Amino acid sequence: MSTDNPTPTPRWCYAVFETQRAERGYIPSVVTEGEPGHQPLIGRDDLSEPWYWGQTFEDARSVCEKANAERGISVEDAEHIVASSIAAQIGQDARRDAQRQRMQQLGMR
């Protein structure tokens, strides 16, 4: 069964945030377009290690830009993807706050 307008797969990119600094360097994250939050690449089990992409933020960012470019994601694309994720997080937080306030008004919390 095919559809005329299949749902496109959201784009994703690597991103490095200044707050994601560990002793051995900066840990990159995966950010998905339109989805709140990010997923730091810290490993999945006890035998995994985080990814480290540079001791300085500039070095980590350079590795990040190269990894995204290899996937066909430009700096501008990555900025858009991250901005859409931030907007989704803000929207999610606002809905959660409104729901919490409504529950308080009804005496449910």
Image (cartoon, rainbow, N blue to C red):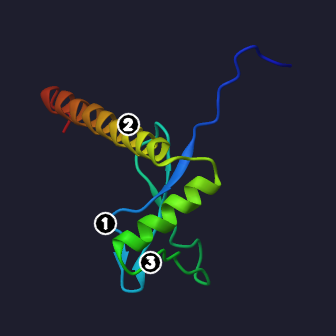
Q: Is residue 6 left or right of residue 99?
A: right
Residue 102 percent coordinates (x, y): 19, 27
Residue situated in front as seen by the camera: 4 or 70: 70
Residue lying at the far right of the rendered structure:
1
Q: Is residue 21 left or right of residue 39?
A: left
What's the residue type where badge 1 is placed? Answer: Glu
Which residue corresponds to the image point at 42% horizontal and 73% vertical from the top-left? 59
- Mark nearest the camera among 1 and 2 is 1
Q: Earlier in the sequence, mark 1 or mark 2?
A: 1
Which residue corresponds to the image point at 52% horizontal and 47% vertical from the top-left? 74
Let me know if residue 71 appears in the view.
yes
Label 1 sits on a secondary structure element that is: loop
What's the residue type where badge 3 is placed? Answer: Gly
Let me know if residue 40 appears in the view.
no
Is the Cβ of the residue at disc 2 closer than 8 Å to that at disc 3?
Answer: no
What's the residue type where badge 2 is placed? Answer: Ala
Q: CA distance from mark 1 to mark 2?
A: 20 Å
Mark number displayed over residue 54: 3
Residue 29 percent coordinates (x, y): 47, 61
Mark number displayed over residue 18: 1
Label 2 sits on a secondary structure element that is: helix
Residue situated in front as seen by the camera: 101 or 33: 33
Q: CA distance from mark 2 to mark 3?
A: 29 Å
- Mark nearest the camera among 3 and 1 is 3
Q: Is residue 92 left or right of residue 108?
A: right
Q: Earlier in the sequence, mark 3 or mark 1?
A: 1
Q: Quadrant of residue 18?
A: bottom left
